[in-house]
Image (cartoon, rainbow, N blue to C red):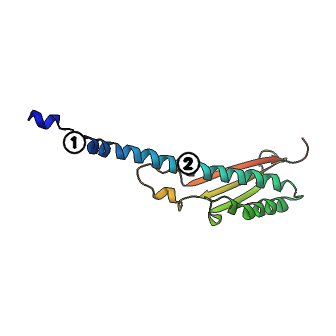
Amino acid sequence: MTRLFRCRSGASAVEFALMLPLFLAFIFGIIVFGSYLAMVHGVQQLAAEAARSSIAGMTDTERNSLATSYVTANVSTYPLLVPGNLTVNAAPSASNANVYIVTLNYNAAGNFIYKLPFVPAPASTIVRSAAIQYGGF
């Protein structure tokens, strides 16, 4: 029996089997949350740039059109964003008449990160907005 306890020939295989799930959880976690943060950053950048481009409009309808056109033209430059899953809402602020707000809603539910095992999935709806003030004040 003492000879059996001294034998170390399968110790590496057992250690590998014990550590593999933890290692995979870390790797998939890095992939999932890194991809999620890239999507969030892309949506925020699009909202900010759409708000900046909307300031050139003279009316709210023209500003809305400029913001929507900017998002439509540039969403394809972000590789993790699907253009059909993005909606734009551009309108003046309810609390300040000199501020225009662009809000983007992105449905990320079909993205590959929601199919990966071992880690909890982040929220599938990403909402980001940007506000810009009219005039020089």
Where residue 54 sits, quadrant-wise, is bottom right
Q: Amino acid at mark 1?
A: Ser
Is 131 or 84 nearer to us in this picture? 84
In-image side of 98 versus 125 (left or right): right
Q: How many marks?
A: 2
Is 18 or 50 nearer to us in this picture? 18
Report the Cα–Cα distance between label 2 and label 1.
39 Å
For the C terminus, the quadrant is top right
Is 64 or 86 nearer to us in this picture? 86
Report crowding for label 2: few under 14, some 14 to 19, many 20 or more residues within 10 A (C-alpha). few
Callout 2–callout 1 Cβ contact below 8 Å: no
Q: Amino acid at mark 2?
A: Gly
Q: Position of residue 55 (x, y in %)?
A: 85, 53
Residue at 27%, 45% in the rendered image:
13
Q: Which mark is residue 9?
A: 1
Q: Which mark is residue 71?
A: none
Q: Which mark is residue 34?
A: 2
For the N terminus, the quadrant is top left
Q: Residue furthest left?
A: 1
Q: Position of residue 95 (x, y in %)?
A: 77, 45
Disc number lying in front (2 or 1): 1
Q: Secondary structure at mark 1?
A: loop
Residue at 46%, 58% in the rendered image:
115
Q: Position of residue 27 (x, y in %)?
A: 46, 47
Where residue 125 sits, quadrant-wise, is bottom right
Residue at 78%, 52% in the rendered image:
51
Q: Is residue 116 above or below residue 25?
A: below
Mark 2 or mark 1: name the one nearer the start of the chain.
1
Residue at 51%, 59% in the rendered image:
112
Q: Position of residue 64 (x, y in %)?
A: 79, 60
